Image (spheres, rainbow, N blue to C red):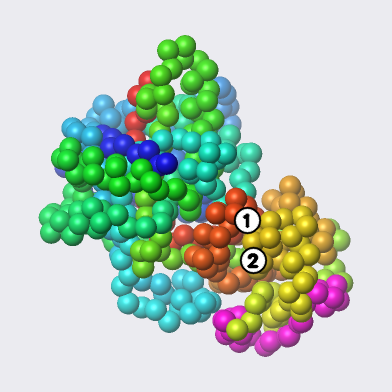
Amino acid sequence: MANILPFRGIFYNKEKIKDLSRVLAPPYDIISTEARERYYEKSEYNVIRLILGKDFSGDDETNNKYTRAAGFFHKWLEEGILVRDNSASIYFLEQEYELKSEVFGAVAGYGARTDAIKRRGFIGLARLENFSKGIIRPHEETMPEPKRDRLNLLRACAANFSQVFTAYEGSPSIIDSLWQEMRRGIPIFDLIDGENIGHRLWKVNDQKSVNLIVEAMKDKKLFIADGHHRYESALEYRNQLRKANPKHRGNESYNYVMAYFLNMEDRGLKILPIHRALRNFAGFDRKRLIAESRKNFGLKRLSHLEKLLGAMQDEEKEHRIGMYAGGDEFYLLTLQERKIAEELARGRGKVSCRLDVVILHTLIIERILGIPPENQENITYSEKINEVLAKVRDGSHCLAFFLRPVKLSEFKAIVEAGEIMPKKSTYFYPKLLSGLVINKIEM
């Protein structure tokens, strides 16, 4: 089963970087162009220069965003901006946060919570395994271009700048005990990021404790929650280095990827929905969309967003999707019959066909709007309701769809069944900070 190892993490040097919040950033794939500029401006040492560099005219194979990232990485190590731990360790991470309605909207009851929530997991190396083995399991579709991008970064830098987020079932008592012990000590990092999320990091480096953690995880299967593109790129990177290394033995560091491990029973694990907005496209006919939707859905027009979100929260009703078509046109779409969802299983798995996101993509986006799965670059994704709403109101997009979150039980059932959700189906919150811990792959 899961094979994990400690490693010598690389960190920002607190003696030279006094405010860590200025040099860290979220995962690359949720950073907009505008946000990237803000991270660039925060500090000349911000990790954005490593994970999401800029393209310039005149870039070529020897001078591009990937080679520049490698240059920054090596320079910061030489200058002591980044420093490496002196012993192989496993790092315990606690994140503290609130879910506020002004950020996520009042969908699924999240908006009502203002109390602090804590999520506790740990960071180590996970041995890369082909999905066919069933040891590490995906849940979302991936796209070729992001995988090429992450692979190019790996080739240039030979480092993991952020963790693959994995979840496992069952809480080993040794890990619970170590958590209680760790929290009595002083963390090596304690910071609050720009979204008012607290991050506290401790390290475990005594051999006995490390060995106990490694042994406790050996009977676990790992479910990828976030970082599918990074994981698949790391697999391809491993495969390429295996072929190039005639003395390959299987214990080389390229056989592992830096990962975050979280018990699924942790109360701090939150899955938020990711909403969709469709950019204007030729042939869009709103009246036809509404007429065709009535064949499978009950449509109820509502006067404003708050009423729509309130109606979506009805837990007794299955398959409820919100739609906004501009002006004051808010619609609640309720699937008329369960057998409609069951018929989708002919082309998809029996478990995934029950998800609202699959019903939305299959029945509306693909069948009615005629947008095939391989050509959906005109869809804008956001976990923030107000962002997709604004896209329609500013005229750049013609439709917005609001979804309820995938339940943890649904996530587990999908992964255990070996099925795959559409891309951007889940938003595991809070995200892990890039640059908090870095793993150097030894060559």
User: Image quadrant for the N terminus?
Assistant: top left
Q: Which residues are magenta?
A: 290-315
Which residue lies at the image location 86% right of the left edge and 61% below the top edge?
Answer: 283
Which residue lies at the image location 78% right of the left edge and 64% below the top edge?
Answer: 343
* 187 displayed left or right of 52: left
Give the residue at mark 2: 355
Which residue lies at the image location 52% right of the left edge and 47% below the top edge?
Answer: 137
Q: Position of residue 225 (x, y in %)?
A: 48, 53
Task: Give the class, few, some or many, for how many residues have Cα within 10 Å of label 2's Cα (few <14, many ≥20).
Answer: many
Amino acid at circle 1 = Met
First in residue order: circle 2 vs circle 1: 2
Name the residue furthest top: 246
Question: Could you tell me how many numbered marks the image carries?
Answer: 2
Q: Are marks 2 and 1 in contact (CB under 8 Å)?
A: yes
Amino acid at circle 2 = Leu
Q: Position of residue 358 (x, y in %)?
A: 68, 62
Which residue lies at the image location 82% right of the left edge and 78% below the top edge?
Answer: 294
Task: Give the class, few, some or many, for how many residues have Cα within 10 Å of label 1's Cα (few <14, many ≥20).
Answer: many
At numbered mark 1, what does the secondary structure look like: helix, strand or loop? loop
Q: Nearer the viewer, residue 23 or 349?
A: 349
**Residue 299 belongs to magenta span:** yes
The label on residue 44 is none
Q: Nearer the viewer, residue 163 or 174?
A: 174
**Residue 437 belongs to magenta span:** no
User: Image quadrant for the C terminus?
Assistant: top left
Q: Nearer the viewer, residue 97 or 212?
A: 212
The label on residue 421 is 1
